[in-house]
């Protein structure tokens, strides 16, 4: 109740009191002036009393309403506080789970790296002693630059390259055609010596296969690739990374079981990694290998076949083995003696949900013929040579 209302009530009370005093003198003439004034004063006091009671009741109702409003606000804040506590508890649990998961990933990957180091130390030591021929002279490898490097020197370079973190991951784009937009990447390893000179696989791969080191290189290639995927996070969700797995690695009793177990423990990588095998390995590896790989396929991992020499493979069998990509050489695709129409090749594979990628495309002349066949995926130096992964991932 504001001041204006109080003033109006008081003035009204005064007017009523004066009127009562006058009427008392008129109605009851025997009353003297003093008695009529007393009657008016009594009426005024009664009006004041009523005014006070009204104000008190009004204030009480106002206070009650305020208390009710405060109680309701309190309940709302209490509910918000409980909700915040629940969300905080859930967030804390999520952070714990996430931290535990990340720690497990780090521990698993550190164990993998430790295994790599022990394998290199063990295998390179054995291989160096085994690289001496019957005449006591060290074997040598012919380099593309016309220089000779002895086998034990190559093994030493590979050994210390791993210890000094000089085995790098290179990525080559796989593009859509004809737009040439990068869709995926294939991963390669490159070894640097202590002078920073790159040693290409063609220079050491035969020795690495003979010594068993190739499985260690496959393992490290996979390890580096996973690091790139971790850094990439949720960016480019449809981009995949193709990793070659050699026949030596598939039959390595140290590497292969660890490889399968590690992938099963990290099946969230299934949408990022594609494991690639040669056609020869696909046709010749024993059933026990494919049974183990099938366990990966069931968890979402997909496979690719390259080094295809003939098109007589069973597409239904490939699809059943979780192959979703096949890489063909341009010469095979454009060979006049193939038993299938070039324009039908893509559709034949597509019926089994297998994507055709033409690799080793190096000139525009062959690209035109490839496009005429309806192929929409390509790879080769025409679209980009393998580049150090750090130069690519920084731009993704």
Image (cartoon, rainbow, N blue to C red):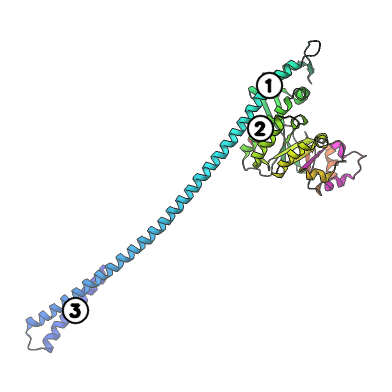
Marks 2, 1: nearer the viewer: 1
Identity of the residue drawn at 6% across and 84% down:
32
The foreground one among 210 and 26 is 210
Is residue 342 found inside the magenta-colored segment of the image?
A: yes
Check disc 3 and report the residue beneath it. 15
Does any portion of residue 387 appear in the rendered image?
Answer: no
Residue 174 quadrant: top right
User: Of the residues under marks 3 and 1, which one precedes in the sequence?
Assistant: 3
Location of the N terminus (image quadrant): bottom left
- The tag on residue 147 is none
Q: Which mark is residue 122?
A: 1
How far apart marks 2 and 3 lie (CA) works out to 99 Å
- Helix, strand or loop status at disc 2: helix
Q: Which mark is residue 223?
A: 2
Q: CA distance from mark 2 to mark 1?
A: 19 Å
Element type at marker 3? helix
Sequence order check: which comes first, mark 2 or mark 3?
Answer: 3
Q: Is residue 192 magenta?
A: no
Q: Residue at x 82, y 46 (%)?
A: 316
In the picture shown, does residue 11 fall above or below 352? below
Q: Position of residue 189 (x, y in %)?
A: 71, 29
Mark 3 and mark 1 residues within 8 Å of each other at the beta carbon: no
- Tell me the CA gap for discs 3 and 1: 116 Å
Name the image quarter holding the C terminus. top right
Q: Is residue 191 above or below residue 272?
A: above
Q: Mark 2: give few (<14), some (14-19) or many (20+) Cα within 10 Å.
A: some
Which segment did they paint magenta?
A: 324-348
Q: Nearer the viewer, residue 330 or 304?
A: 304
Question: Label 1's element?
Answer: helix
Vertical side of 207 occupied by 318: above or below: below
- Say few, some or many: other residues with alpha carbon within 10 Å of mark 1 (under 14 / 14 to 19 / 20 or more): few
The image position of residue 70, as x and y in percent, is 35, 60
């Amino acid at each position: 109740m504001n001041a204006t209302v109080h003033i109006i009530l008081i003035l009204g009370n005064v007017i009523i009191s004066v009127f009562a005093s006058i009427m008392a003198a008129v109605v009851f003439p025997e009353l003297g002036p003093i008695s009529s004034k007393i009657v008016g004063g009594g009426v005024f006091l009664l009006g004041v009393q009523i005014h006070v009671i009204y104000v008190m009741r009004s204030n009480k109702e106002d206070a009650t309403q305020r208390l009710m409003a405060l109680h309701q606000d309190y309940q709302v804040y209490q509910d918000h506080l409980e909700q915040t506590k629940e969300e905080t508890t859930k967030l804390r649990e999520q952070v714990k789970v996430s931290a535990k998961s990340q720690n497990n990933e780090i521990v698993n990957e550190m164990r993998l790296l430790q295994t790599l180091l022990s394998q290199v130390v063990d295998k390179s030591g054995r291989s160096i002693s085994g690289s001496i021929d019957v005449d006591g002279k060290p074997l040598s490898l012919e380099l593309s630059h016309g220089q000779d490097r002895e086998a034990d020197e190559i093994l030493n370079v590979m050994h210390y390259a791993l210890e000094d973190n000089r085995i790098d991951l290179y990525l080559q784009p796989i593009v859509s055609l004809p737009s040439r937009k990068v869709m995926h990447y294939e991963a390669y390893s490159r070894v640097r010596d202590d002078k920073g000179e790159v040693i290409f696989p063609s220079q050491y791969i035969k020795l690495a296969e003979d010594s068993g080191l190739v499985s260690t290189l496959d393992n490290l290639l996979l390890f580096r690739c996973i690091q790139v995927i971790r850094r990439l996070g949720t960016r480019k969700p449809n981009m995949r990374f193709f990793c070659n797995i050699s026949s030596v690695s598939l039959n390595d009793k140290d590497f292969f079981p660890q490889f399968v177990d590690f992938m099963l423990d990290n099946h969230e990588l299934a949408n990022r990694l594609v494991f690639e095998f040669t056609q020869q390995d696909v046709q010749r590896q024993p059933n026990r290998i494919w049974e183990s790989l099938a366990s990966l396929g069931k968890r979402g991992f997909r496979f690719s076949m390259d080094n295809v020499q003939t098109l007589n493979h069973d597409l239904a069998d490939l699809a059943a083995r979780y192959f979703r990509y096949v890489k063909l050489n341009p010469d095979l695709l454009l060979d006049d003696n193939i038993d299938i129409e070039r324009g039908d090749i893509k559709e034949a594979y597509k019926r089994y949900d297998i994507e055709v990628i033409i690799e080793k495309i190096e000139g525009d002349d062959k690209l035109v013929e490839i496009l005429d066949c309806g192929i929409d995926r390509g790879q080769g130096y025409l679209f980009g040579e393998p580049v150090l992964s750090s130069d690519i991932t920084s731009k993704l």
